[in-house]
Amino acid sequence: MTAAQPAAAQTAPVQTAPAQGPAGSAAQSTDSRPVTLQAVEQTPTALWNDSADPRELGTAIREFGAVGATCNPVIALTCIRQDPETWLPRLRELAAEHPTATEAELGWKAVEELSVTAAAMLLPAFESSGGRNGRLSMQTDPRLHRDKNALVEQAERFSQLAPNIIVKIPATKTGIAAIEEAAYRGVSINATVSFTVAQVVAVGEAIERALDRRAADGLPDREFGHVVTLMAGRLDDWLKAVIARDRIMIDPGYLEWAGVGAVKHAYRIFRERGFRSRVLVAAFRNPMQWSELQGGDLVISPPFQWAKDINDNAVPFRPNAIDDDVPSHVLDALRAATPEFAKGYDADGMTIDEFDAFGATVRTLRQFLQADADLDALVRDVLVPAV
């Protein structure tokens, strides 16, 4: 196996169980349905759709087997831009309904409407799973990332918009404190801005503390569906940027394994420690983030186009792929190339005080903040069109 071709060398087509032929003899038949649908039926792994666009989400639910979705300012901005016939008139209506609302307030009303619509589409999966799946992830305003109380207050409000809302809060130092408090108050949590094993373990521990506090205080227990995102591809992105910046020579195929390895490592830690939350994989960059992570009790959340491409190419999966180790020489090479890999891979790679300054954290927060600004500008163009 070469490092440049890691996925193809380790996967094989998945087939259905032997079927009886006309004469009663067993005959092996290939399942031609979307591979994502096959995977969710054959393994505990849940598929979510990393978009709240109702057109994409409808296909993902009906055809791909998706039982969850997400929304944030980047996604909302993309949805509005892709469907201006629907959203530009709606923004004008919202402006008329709320004549004193700011650009930011109107933009977030659109985010809320998009989220509530998607949540309704997922309600059957929510009800059939007892609340474990069927969740719509709604992200708190990135501009609140420094204010724990504001994050908690907004998380509580978002959680009341629909019964199956799960709220995204960043896995920063302030964000993790907000996660613990919001989870204690009964908010279903999805950590975001999270790229490292150290971050997801810290979030898992915070959720455990919150659940224990609830039990100690006699608060009701239920299926909250808590998930902890590891944005695997964004860890890859950061390591590639560091390698380029520092002019380090390494087999480029090895860099495709970093996020995959971090997810596998985090998943094992969650299992060993009995955390009551699940790892969620997001930020797809290569097919291994699908094929190498199947089989575990976790969530895989590719963007719609990635899920479509996986199915169009019938990218195979192995039902126990999550348990396979990343080749040790690949991990050794990544560790030797840059200390940034250890920060991302090791459970003690960073302290909570270091999370905010990690390169991927800074990059992603800036992108989310820019999306907020871009959404404001879009609303501004509707309210005060250029002449």
Image (tube, grey):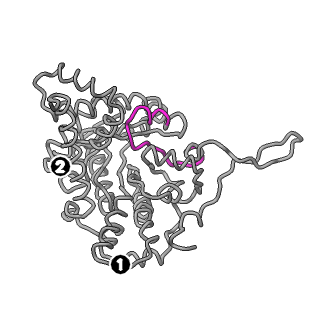
Q: Amino acid at mark 1?
A: Ala
| CB atoms of marks 1 and 2 within 8 Å | no
Q: Is residue 171 left or right of residue 3?
A: left
Q: Does the segment drawn in magenta span residue 44?
A: yes
Disc 1 target residue: 337
Disc 2 target residue: 145
Q: Position of residue 257 (x, y in %)?
A: 45, 67
Q: Position of residue 335 (x, y in %)?
A: 37, 76
Residue under the image location 53 percent in, 33 percent down: 62
In primary-sequence order, the first of circles 1 and 2 is 2
Stretch of the chain drawn in magenta: 41-59
Q: Quadrant of the C terminus?
A: top left
Q: Is residue 237 left or right of residue 103?
A: right
Residue 207 or 354: which is nearer the viewer? 354
Secondary structure of the residue carrying numbered label 2: loop
Foreground tag (1 vs 2):
1
Q: Position of residue 209 (x, y in %)?
A: 27, 51
Between marks 1 and 2, how big is the CA–CA gap? Answer: 32 Å
The relative height of residue 319 versus residue 242 in the rendered view (above or below) is: above
